Amino acid sequence: MDPEAENFYKSLEVLDSNINLIFPLIMIPFGTIANLLTLIIYNQKPFKNTSIGFYYSCLSIVDSLALCIGSIKFYLINTNIISSVKILAIACKFFITNTYIFSEYSAWILVVTSLDRLVTILNYPSLFFIRTKTFRKICLIILFLILALLNSPSLIYLRVTIEEIDITVNETTLYYTCELERDSIYNDQFRDVLDLFLFALMPFAFMILSNGLISYKIIKSKNKFKRRMSLVRKKNANKEYQLAMTIIGTNFLFLLLNLPICVVQIARNFMNDSNFSLRMRLNLVYTISNILSYINLSSSLFINLVFNHIFKRKFFQMFQIISRRKTTCSKN
């Protein structure tokens, strides 16, 4: 490799490392605060004890867990800190497995939320049991157990290996890795395919289908309400429209921000290991795609502020109350 190309790839590696160092420090507090605000607002009236309030509260908690666990995993692996500390290499088994579980769980909560909203809009009496609190809780518990079961082999097949590397003639150092065995059934390619199926392909299909039907029903209903011009019905229609648009917006952003990481994962699996230039570029693209995926985990607050006017009003009311209390305390 010529010196110019070597310097270029070194600069790429440094950039990739710097992004990995800075990203968790920004995203963990930012995403956690955004999800906490969403959780607080959705546990107030008029959202409290509603299906939309329940699902978005669960989504906020799961997104925060996925963001924190995923960011730590992302930091440990990509900054290569685990290579020098054995306990971190062992901890990586936990972080890697749970990142997959909670990321996939977040996607499926969005799917269930979309299906719940679709049932509400279709208004079939025979499907009313789907919207009961008991069914919602059981549904989410079963979903979590299925995803945990499907991802549990990761804990078994991830191996913490120890290698001795000679630094000088008289000095050696221990190098720890936490990787899947290439010769095992549950290797990197198999896990990536399973993750793409559970995190992307199936949720994408359900989201597109349910949100397409919701959009069609909304357009049809809006035309009907325009003709009838009933104020009560128009108000209810606007409320349903806002909730539906919030869910469609959340789903659309999920598809948009997670599509790059899916494409890059597929590319990395079929990449030629000997092509150093392509591998270096893909590593940087993978880092950026990962960041987009984690940004999605803190996006529900902003989607709600854009589409849900009731949520927006509650959000600003909350800050007005805080500012009034601060003013009162300063006067006292």
Image (tube, grey):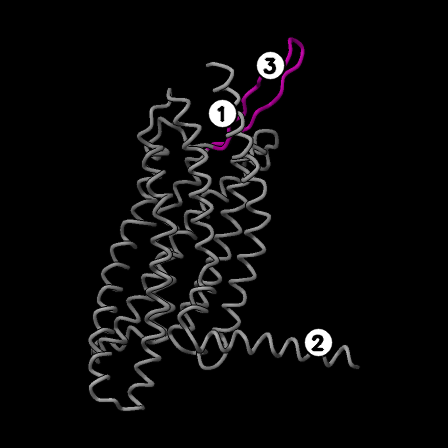
Q: Amino acid at mark 2?
A: Lys
Query: What amino acid is found at the position of numbered circle 1 in the picture?
Result: Tyr
Residue 2 drawn in magenta = no
Which one is nearer the viewer's eye here, 177 or 24? 24
Q: Position of residue 132 (x, y in %)?
A: 33, 76
Any part of residue 46 in sight: yes
Which residue was labeled with disc 1?
9
Q: Are marks 3 and 1 in contact (CB under 8 Å)?
A: no
Q: Is residue 227 left or right of residue 261?
A: left
Which numbered marker is on residue 251? Answer: none
> Residue 121 lies in what quarter of the image?
bottom left
Q: Residue furthest top?
A: 169
| Label 2: how many Cα within 10 Å (few below 14, some 14–19, many 20+) | few
Sooner in the amino-acid sequence: mark 3 or mark 1 = 1
Is 160 covered by the magenta stretch? yes
Provide residue 305's location: percent of width, then percent of height: 46, 69
Camera-side residue: 202 or 299? 299
Amino acid type shown at disc 3: Asp
In this view, the residue farthest toward the front is 4
Q: Which residue is mark 3?
A: 166
Mark 3 nearby-residue class (10 Å; few <14, some 14–19, many ≥20): few
Q: Give the total number of marks visible in the rendering.
A: 3
Magenta residues, start to end:
159-178
